[in-house]
Amino acid sequence: MNRVYVCSCFGITDRQVKEHAAAGACTPRQIASVTKAGTDCGSCVRTIQGILGRGACPRRELLEKGDAAAVLAAAPAPQLAEAA
């Protein structure tokens, strides 16, 4: 299996970023909170932004509607396997 590393500092792959995005992480900061990617040298942040794209984000949509309580209730509990 080919692994494309997004974050060399912490060994985070594009697959892991995509899995966390599918679980609800919408921003590089949210990815960083569960993987540490982007918190050391920072060179991967733009790559993470590219992977996340500008697609629909359930949290962002709830915030735009003014429903902060629903955002907190919908926050995923990141429990994805680190080894892919």
Image: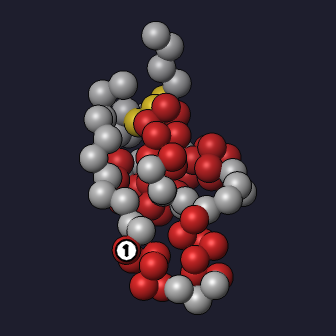
Nearer to me, 48 or 58: 58
Looking at the image, which residue sits at the far right?
A: 54
| Residue drawn at (54%, 69%) of the image | 59
Total label count? 1
Task: Estimate the x, y position of residue 38 in percent, counting from the top left.
Answer: 45, 52
Q: Residues within 10 Å of mark 1 (few under 14, many from 20)?
A: few
Q: Nearer the viewer, residue 43 or 33?
A: 33
Q: Indicate the colouring scheme.
A: secondary structure
Residue 2, horizontal then vertical, whole percent: 50, 13
User: Residue 14: x, y in percent?
Assistant: 52, 34
Which quarter of the rendering shows the C terminus?
A: top left
Q: Which image quadrant for residue 81?
A: top left
Q: Residue furthest top?
A: 1
Where on the picture, by quarter, is residue 60? bottom right
Q: Position of residue 77 (x, y in %)?
A: 30, 57
Amino acid on which disc 1 is placed: Ala
Q: Secondary structure at mark 1?
A: helix
Q: Is residue 53 above or below residue 59?
A: above
**Whether residue 38 can be seen here:** no
Q: Which residue is mark 1?
A: 73
Up/down of 70 relative to 14, above or below: below
Residue 63 appears in the figure = yes
Residue 66 falls left or right of residue 73: right
Residue at (35%, 48%) from the top-left corner?
Answer: 35
Residue at x 46%, y 10% (from the top left corner): 1
Left or right? Give the position of 59 relative to 53. left
Q: Is residue 25 above or below residue 10?
A: below
In the current view of this chain or complex, which residue is farthest to the bottom? 66
For the residue pair 70 and 22, the one nearer the viewer reads as: 70
User: Which residue shows up at 41% across the image and 56% down it?
Assistant: 32
